[in-house]
Amino acid sequence: MLWGKHVIVVFADELDGPLIHDIQYQEVENNKITYHRSYFFRKEFIFAAAKELGFKPQLNKHPVSWEEN
């Protein structure tokens, strides 16, 4: 559960533990997915969700890097 919604949290298994790679939301009707959304590219969303869930976000994931230079 994230902010009152059932979500799928995709983790990357890294040396320093599991990191949030993606968060997905789906709506299901009659046992079929009718709506799917991925937040893979939503930096602010992933960071806020990571804080809420108590995990770190994955900062370097192809094709993006959110590491500060």
Image (tube, rainbow, N blue to C red):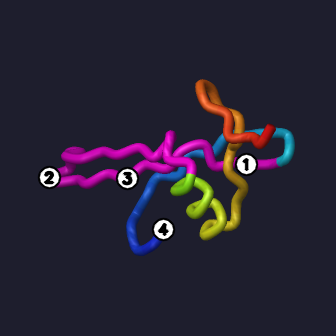
Residue flagged by tag 4: what amino acid is it?
Leu
Q: What amino acid type is highlighted by mark number 3?
A: Tyr
Cα gap from disc 1 to disc 3, whole angstroms: 20 Å
Which residue is at the far bottom?
A: 4
> SS at mark 3?
strand
Label 3 CA crowd tier, 10 Å (few <14, some 14–19, many 20+): some
Q: Quadrant of residue 66?
A: top right
Question: Which amino acid, mark 2?
Answer: Asn
Q: Are marks 3 and 4 in contact (CB under 8 Å)?
A: no
Per the rendered image, the range of residues in magenta is 17-43
- Locate residue 60, reporting x and y percent: 71, 35
Badge 4 density bin: few <14, some 14–19, many ≥20, Cα 10 Å: few
Which residue, given by chain and number where applicable, does mark 1 sit on? 18
Mark 1 Cα shell of 10 Å, populated few (<14), some (14-19), many (≥20): some
- Tell which tag, 2 or 4, sits nearer the viewer: 4
**What residue is shown with label 4?**
2
**Which of pointers 1 and 2 lies earlier in the amino acid sequence?**
1
Say what secondary structure mark 4 lies in: loop
Q: Cβ–Cβ below 8 Å for labels 3 and 2?
A: no
- Number of the label disc, if any, that sits on residue 25: 3
- From the image, state whether disc 1 or disc 2 is nearer to you: 1
